[in-house]
Amino acid sequence: MQTPNDPKRLHFILGNVILGLAAVMLLFMGHLWEMMGAWSLVLWMAMAAGGVYLIAKDKDIGPGGPPN
């Protein structure tokens, strides 16, 4: 059972928040492009990559056992 202060849960929630912000950022990409230029795309890519990394960071990728 996971506790509220479990680092895996914190990474998962933080990753989802960052991905949510990256999704909202896409709605304003035209305005951000005018303000920041290509750096807005770099920022979006970094946010998307960071969010996915945090979500997938603590997943168990070990080989599964035989089916039961």
Image (cartoon, rainbow, N blue to C red):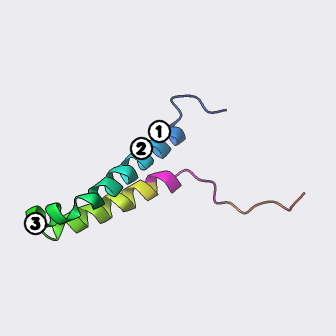
- First-in-chain label (3 vs 1): 1
Mark 3 vs 2, N-terminal side: 2
Is disc 1 in contact with disc 2, using a CB cutoff of under 8 Å? yes
Residue 33 appears at what percent x and percent y?
15, 66
**Quadrant location, the N terminus:** top right
Magenta part of the protein: which range?
A: 54-61
Most frequent secondary structure within the magenta stretch: loop
Residue with the mark numbered 1: 10
Kindly identify which residue carries mark 3. 34
Q: What is the x, y in percent for residue 31? A: 15, 61
Residue depicted at x 16% and y 61% = 32
Residue extending farthest to the right is: 68
Outermost residue toward the left in this view: 35
- The front one of 55 and 23 is 23
4 falls in the magenta region: no
Neighbour tally class for label 2: few under 14, some 14-19, many 20 plus, Cα within 10 Å:
some
Residue 39 to residue 18: above or below:
below
- Regarding mark 3 in the picture, which secondary structure is present there? helix
Q: Nearer the viewer, mark 3 or mark 2?
A: 3
Q: Is residue 10 above or below residue 27?
A: above
In this view, the residue in front, 19 or 63, is: 19
Q: Secondary structure at mark 1?
A: helix
Nearer the observer, 6 or 17: 17
Q: Amino acid at mark 2?
A: Leu
The span from disc 3 to disc 1 (Cα, nearest Å) is 34 Å
